[in-house]
Image: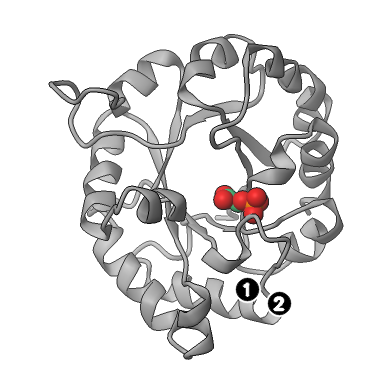
Amino acid sequence: MARRMLIAGNWKMNGLRQSLGFLEEIRPAAHSRRNVDVLLAPPATLIVSAAEIAGPVKIGGQDCHIHPSGAHTGDISAEMLRDAGASYVIVGHSERRADHGESSELVRAKAEAAQAAGLVPMICVGESESDRREGKAEAVVGEQLHQSLPGSTAYVIAYEPVWAIGTGLTASLDDIAAMHAFIRSKLPDGATTQILYGGSVKPANAADILSLNDVDGALVGGASLKAADFGAIIEAAP
Ligand code: PGA
């Protein structure tokens, strides 16, 4: 079965209500690409409004708690995201692993909570610059997968080398191809699981990255803040 392409935008801590005109602007690109799924993960404050006007675009959260409800001030559960109109949630983004000390075990629990709530978790993995310099990239990513993956294979993987996120640096096409093949070989349902690449994806490099065999889409940060750029990345998908 051919894997569909998924182009996902991660707005991180950006976006106000007035930013949602974006969804209107990318609609023509999203509509014209029948074989490409388009996902936007806005900040949690915008999920309800975004879902109401999303049209063909799927809406996702950027994180979730491991419990469906309870005394966890400031947190948001997967069930709440689903109720707000999300169908996906990013878990284990490197910014959460770094800023909030999230372990792979916690990421796995979040992925399981997402699945239990009917969301597709997008599980992020990726090595640091020193890991890659020291030749440990595959070992680190392999360990993250081993510890982060839930038993049920209803998930999407995003490979994002930490040093490529928000830096304008992208991994070489050879390195992306090699890491995606490695990740696929480690997945219990490798033939059908979508593996996205993330890290400074932009209109200028999207076509090359997305044409690689084992790359099934992109997780886009900075370039997802501008409708013209995000639209161009959607158009660049093969
Ligand atoms: P970037 O972010 O595209 O700005 O590098 C990607 C991400 O963090 O998901």
Viewer can see residue 169: yes
Q: Which residue is mark 2?
A: 172
Determine which residue is flagged by label 1: 176
Q: Residues within 10 Å of mark 1 (few under 14, many from 20)?
A: many
Q: Quadrant of residue 200?
A: bottom right
Numbered circles on residues, count: 2
CA neighbours of label 2 inside 10 A, class few (<14), some (14 to 19), many (20+): few
Figure coloring: one colour
Snapshot quadrant of residue 201: bottom right
Q: Where's the C terminus, which quadrant?
A: bottom right
For image coordinates 78% across by 34% down, the residue present is 226
Residue at image x 63%, y 73%? 176
Question: 149 left or right of 175?
Answer: left
Name the element at disc 2: loop
Residue type, numbered disc 1: Ile
Q: Nearer the viewer, residue 192 or 195?
A: 195
Q: Is residue 230 above or below residue 95?
A: above
